[in-house]
Amino acid sequence: DIQMTQSPSTLSASVGDRVTITCRASRNIGTSLAWFQQKPGKAPKLLMHTRSTLVNGDPSRFSGSGSGTEFTLTISNLQPDDFATYYCQQYSSSSRTFGQGTKVEIK
Amino acid sequence: EVQLVESGGGLIPVGGSLRLSCAASGFTFSSRGMSWARQAPGKGLEWVSSISGSGTTTAYADSAKGRFTISRDNSKSTVYLQMDSLRVEDTALYYCARGDCPGDCYLTDYWGQGILVTVSS
């Protein structure tokens, strides 16, 4: 199975900051990488797929990059609504594994 | 508006069985694969099982193989997860999710609010 590793596990930041979350795959997944956002007590929400394609309606302060085994999610100008846990997921193989999550919390 | 509403969860003893249901609306149900995923308390997300729009193709995580069975009734726009031989480690919030394709979709684009399954020893 492909393992997905996110870093950091927790990130403390302030409104207006630029933050970056890294996701590493144990083998090449091309650009088959999605990012989900989950707020406490809520369902995960698909934020981005194919490495950098934003889902309709998501703000452009979210951006994705990378290919192969290393990917990043960047949030520019962090807003109060962005404090949440973010998960990457590979959908290159049938195991469709998730990273362990990165919690973005208020500093 | 896409809506996915899970039901059927609860407290069940080790070794017991439970059937989860997910009622879908707001899209052409038969044209989308559907999945179940779960989240243990305080933990991350884990894919459990998927089924194609026609119901002919199914897939399972290793943790679910041989114990869980996914099925769907397109006339009722409902997907099911039959869970047998339940273990303590199956305790989790179970989510129903819509696939982004008609087949066994590896990517999901909408998730329900989840239903809690607690397996007690």
Image: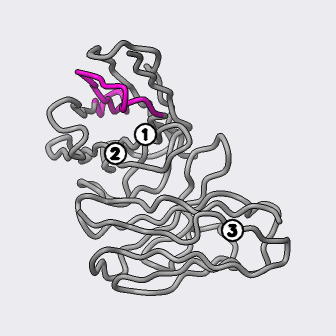
Residue B68 pos. (x, y %):
23, 31
Determine whether, in the image, residue A93 is placed left or right of residue A51: left
Subunit of label 3: A
Q: In the rendered image of this protein, does residue B99 appear above or below residue A69?
A: above
The residue at which mark 1 appears reads as: B96
- Say which amino acid is labelled 1: Cys
Residue at the image position 17 percent from the left and 38 percent from the top? B65
Q: Secondary structure at mark 1?
A: strand
Q: Earlier in the sequence, mark 2 or mark 1?
A: 2
- Corner quadrant of residue A57: bottom right
Subunit of label 2: B
Q: Which residues are magenta?
A: B73-92
Residue A66 highlighted magenta (yes or no)? no
Determine whether, in the image, residue B79 is placed left or right of residue A85: left
Are the residues flagged by discs 2 and 1 in contact, CB closer than 8 Å? yes
The residue at which mark 2 appears reads as: B34
Q: Rounded to the nearest whole Å, what is the CA distance between mark 2 and mark 1?
A: 7 Å
- Say which amino acid is labelled 3: Leu
Are the residues flagged by discs 3 and 2 in contact, CB closer than 8 Å? no
Task: Say which of marks 1 and 3 sits in front.
Answer: 3
Determine whether, in the image, residue B109 is placed left or right of residue A40: left
Subunit of label 1: B
Q: Secondary structure at mark 2?
A: strand
Q: Which mark is residue B62?
A: none
Name the foreground residue: B50 vs B30: B50
Task: Say which of marks 3 and 2 sits in front.
Answer: 3
Q: Are marks 1 and 3 on the same chain?
A: no
Q: Are marks 3 and 2 on the same chain?
A: no
The residue at which mark 3 appears reads as: A11
- Say which amino acid is labelled 2: Met
Residue at the image position 42 percent from the left and 31 percent from the top? B22
Q: In the rendered image of this protein, does residue B84 appear above or below residue A93?
A: above
